[in-house]
């Protein structure tokens, strides 16, 4: 029994000695590892992953009226009245000016009398033909006399038609003494006052009416950018939104504020301006409060599409070399720093959209850049992930719907 206890004690002593030796060895290794890492610079990295991003292009442009009508007189005369308020709204067909109608009223009455005279002559000629017709058969009236009566009747009918046309012309001229608005919209200042002499189809407009609800926004896009976008859409790199979102345009005003109502892209010009190398795009916006006025400078944001596999790199991790090209420092699988030359497309928030030089899974250094250089070994600590922005969340939802 004593022998058994003696062996147990010896075994416990050996086990304790082994554990102690192992602990001392691990502690020594840990100290060596800490000592090794103590000389390595520590950096903060962001591991890249593809994500759907909604891409848009902001273009400069100007507003223009939906419809413009220059009001000109169509008859000669003296302006008697101006019947509108400058800068006010006018309706289609609303009378704007009154030209002195006296001469045109007299001409109308004269043509009316001429028509009555021609109709009376036609009636007389027709009765004469009816009277001669049975007499020709009995040779009481010569055939020549009858033919002359028929010709006189036909001429009287033509005189009636001519008198009706002249009366209609006189009526139209009388109507034209009332200068009407051809469209609905806002009328500008009047260039004439009461008592002014105006002439038919004169070069100077009496006033200008502009319809500004809705209103056009004309923007220009580089033909190079347009070709690049068409190529990306054709290759499937970008996917167009569908439905109402497909052609929506957002507007930024001159003071930097956002126009609250989105517009729609209406058409794209088919000709490139040879002097600027750009293409005209036209969007139409609702303008019920008349906040947009013709000639305003604006910036329009057009949706290009959704890139489902885009790489967004924080701007703080991208620098430029001596040639001005964007570069980034990446920690490879061996924890060594590599220098990558990038191609960037555009800035989206505080990140760059990178099209070349990086791939999903790369660890880009965003903090500690000043302490490292390519080729050295570093200790990489992952940066805390930021919450996705609303724009990225919406883009992801849009991409999910398309897929």
Image (cartoon, grey):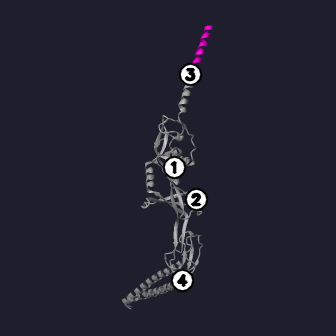
Disc count in the image? 4
How far is disc 3 from disc 4 in space, using C-alphas? 123 Å
Ranked by sequence position, the earlier of labels 1 and 4 is 4
How far is disc 2 from disc 4 in space, using C-alphas? 55 Å
Q: Which residues are magenta?
A: 1-25
How far is disc 2 from disc 1 in space, using C-alphas? 22 Å
Eye-nearest disc, 3 or 4: 3
The residue at 48%/48% (across/down) is 344
How far is disc 2 from disc 3 in space, using C-alphas? 72 Å
In the rendered image, residue 166, in percent from the top left (x then y), is placed at 47, 82
**Looking at the rendering, which quadrant does residue 128 occupy?**
bottom left
Dot label at residue 347: 1
Q: Does the magenta segment cover residue 14?
A: yes
Q: Does the magenta segment cover residue 70?
A: no
Eye-nearest disc, 2 or 4: 2
Q: Which residue is mark 2?
A: 255
- Can I make out residue 155 in this image? yes
Dot label at residue 22: 3
Name of the residue lying farthest toward the bottom: 140
Q: Where is 244 relative to 157, above or below?
A: above
Secondary structure of the residue carrying tag 2 is loop
Secondary structure of the residue carrying tag 1 is strand
Ranked by sequence position, the earlier of labels 3 and 4 is 3
How far is disc 1 from disc 4 in space, using C-alphas? 71 Å
């Amino acid at each position: 029994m004593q022998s058994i206890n003696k062996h147990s004690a010896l075994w416990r002593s050996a086990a304790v000695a082994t554990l102690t030796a192992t602990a001392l060895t691990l502690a020594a290794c840990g100290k060596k590892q800490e000592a090794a890492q103590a000389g390595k610079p520590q950096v903060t990295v962001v591991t890249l992953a593809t994500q759907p991003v909604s891409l848009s292009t902001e273009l400069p442009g100007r507003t223009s009226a939906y419809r413009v009508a220059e009001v000109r007189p169509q008859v000669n005369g003296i302006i008697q009245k101006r019947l509108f308020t400058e800068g006010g709204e006018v309706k289609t067909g609303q009378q704007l000016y009154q030209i002195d109608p006296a001469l045109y009223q007299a001409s109308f009455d004269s043509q009316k009398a001429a028509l009555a005279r021609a109709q009376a002559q036609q009636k007389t000629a027709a009765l004469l033909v009816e009277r001669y017709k049975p007499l020709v058969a009995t040779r009481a009236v010569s055939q020549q006399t009858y033919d002359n009566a028929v010709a006189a009747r036909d001429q009287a009918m033509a005189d009636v038609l001519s008198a009706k046309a002249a009366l209609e012309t006189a009526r139209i001229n009388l109507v034209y003494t009332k200068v009407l608005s051809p469209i609905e919209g806002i009328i500008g200042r009047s260039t004439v006052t009461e008592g002014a002499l105006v002439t038919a189809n004169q070069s100077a407009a009496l006033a200008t009416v502009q319809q500004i609800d809705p209103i056009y926004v004309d923007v220009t896009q580089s033909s190079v950018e347009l070709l690049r976008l068409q190529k990306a859409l054709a290759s499937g790199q970008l996917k167009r939104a569908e439905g109402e979102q497909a052609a929506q345009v957002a507007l930024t005003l001159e003071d930097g504020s956002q126009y609250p109502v989105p517009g729609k892209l209406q058409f794209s010009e088919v000709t490139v301006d040879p002097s600027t190398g750009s293409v005209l795009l036209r969007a139409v916006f609702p303008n019920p409060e008349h906040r947009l006025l013709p000639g305003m400078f604006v910036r329009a944001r057009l949706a290009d599409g959704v890139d489902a596999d885009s790489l967004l790199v924080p701007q703080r991790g991208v620098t430029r070399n001596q040639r001005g090209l964007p570069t980034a420092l990446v920690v490879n699988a061996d924890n060594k720093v590599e220098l990558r030359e990038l191609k960037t497309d555009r800035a989206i928030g505080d990140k760059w959209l990178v099209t070349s030089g990086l791939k999903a899974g790369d660890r880009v250094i965003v903090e500690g850049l000043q302490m490292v250089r390519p080729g050295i070994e570093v200790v990489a600590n992952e940066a805390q992930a930021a919450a996705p922005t609303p724009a990225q969340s919406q883009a992801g939802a849009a991409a999910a719907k398309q897929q």
